[in-house]
Image (cartoon, rainbow, N blue to C red):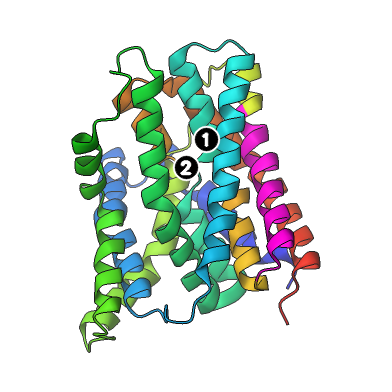
Amino acid sequence: MPITAAIAPIFVLIILGYALRRGGIPSQDFWNLNDRLVYFLLMPAVFFEQISTADLSGAALGGYSAMLYGGFAVAMFAGLLAARGLSCDPASATSVVQGAARFNTFIALAVAEALFGAPGLQMAVLGAAILVPGVNVAVVAMFALMLPSGTGRIDLGGLARTLLGNPLILAILAGLGWNAAGLGAWPVFHPTLAILGDAALPIMLLSVGANLKLRGLQAERAPLAAAIACKLLLFPLVVLGLALLLGLDPLQAQVAVIFAALPTGVAAYTLARQLGGDATLLASVITLSTLLSFATMPATLWLTGLLFPIS
């Protein structure tokens, strides 16, 4: 099946989520509660169920990790250089960096499953497990170092509390611990998590669309363009180059490029509001990168499929 046809339903659900929320269906309160359901139950259920039962003994995750973190680091550094080159104020600079390097994990899981089935979903969950803790550390540290209100030092205690308060990270750690203990899949428990996982992806995609903000977008064009160029062009090119350099497994390469080609994640907007970044700029980055990814992601994945065909 052509890539565009395979992932088109994902973007249709995103658009549907936007339309439903803007139409007040079923209510604004529903969407606010739905975000909490996704964050505190559905996503952790997916992560724990997939990681706790994955075969990690022979998984060559070193190269996979290098691809993911190599692309993230280059995109983050490029965003920082772009912000400085454009003389952005510190708050705007943090949003350019977040916009350039952060990604929407919800879409990654859905695209990987749509293209590669259960193995793709599991590889995407492992990719998220690899990236999510490190990305959170890097971004929180960036805020501490870049904003004038910060101390210029990283509060290790506060950082640990932030990480341990993240349900996704807790689910990752619990899944890894379960896996290491060799407990395997338990009757009733794991099938229940699997059912939650089946519900999770469509609900998460509706939530992505519900959180888009097309009206009243106000942001300077240069920082906006810089963040989006780093996210949708530079990040995937770097990951693709690393995949070619390292000669990795085709499934790992393709799923890593999925992460790289993703639009900026909504969680970046929440963090910008909490820590003093330019939330208006980041809302524009998230919305426009999501819309543009409708075109850029199929093209990027088509190129990756040519270079890393899966037999």
| Quarter the C terminus occupies | bottom right
Q: Tell me the element at label 1.
A: helix
- Write the residue at 55% across / 30% down: 285
Up-down: is 215 above or below 178?
A: above
Q: Position of residue 54 (x, y in %)?
A: 40, 79
Spatial CA span between label 1 and label 2? 7 Å
Q: Main secondary structure of the magenta part?
A: helix
Q: Are marks 1 and 2 in contact (CB under 8 Å)?
A: yes
Q: Nearer the viewer, residue 103 or 136?
A: 136
Relative image position of residue 267 (x, y in whole percent): 39, 40
Q: Is residue 214 left or right of residue 56?
A: right
Is residue 237 on the magenta stretch? yes
Is residue 171 placed above or below 51 in the rendered structure?
Answer: above
The residue labelled by disc 1 is: 286
Return the disc, 1 or 2, that comes first in the chain's sequence: 2
Neighbour class for label 2 at 10 Å: few (<14), some, many (≥20)?
Answer: many
The one nearer the camera, 216 or 138, is 138
Q: Can you say whether 66 is above or below 263 in the image?
A: below
Q: Is residue 298 left or right of residue 277?
A: right
Residue in front for this viewpoint, 236 or 23: 236
Examine the rendering and report whether any part of residue 262 can be seen. no
Does residue 120 belong to the magenta stretch? Answer: no
Identify the residue at horizontal 42%, vertical 36% (top origin).
268
The disc labelled 1 sits on which kind of residue?
Ile
| Residue 211 figure quarter | top left
According to the picture, the residue beneath numbered tag 2 turns out to be 265
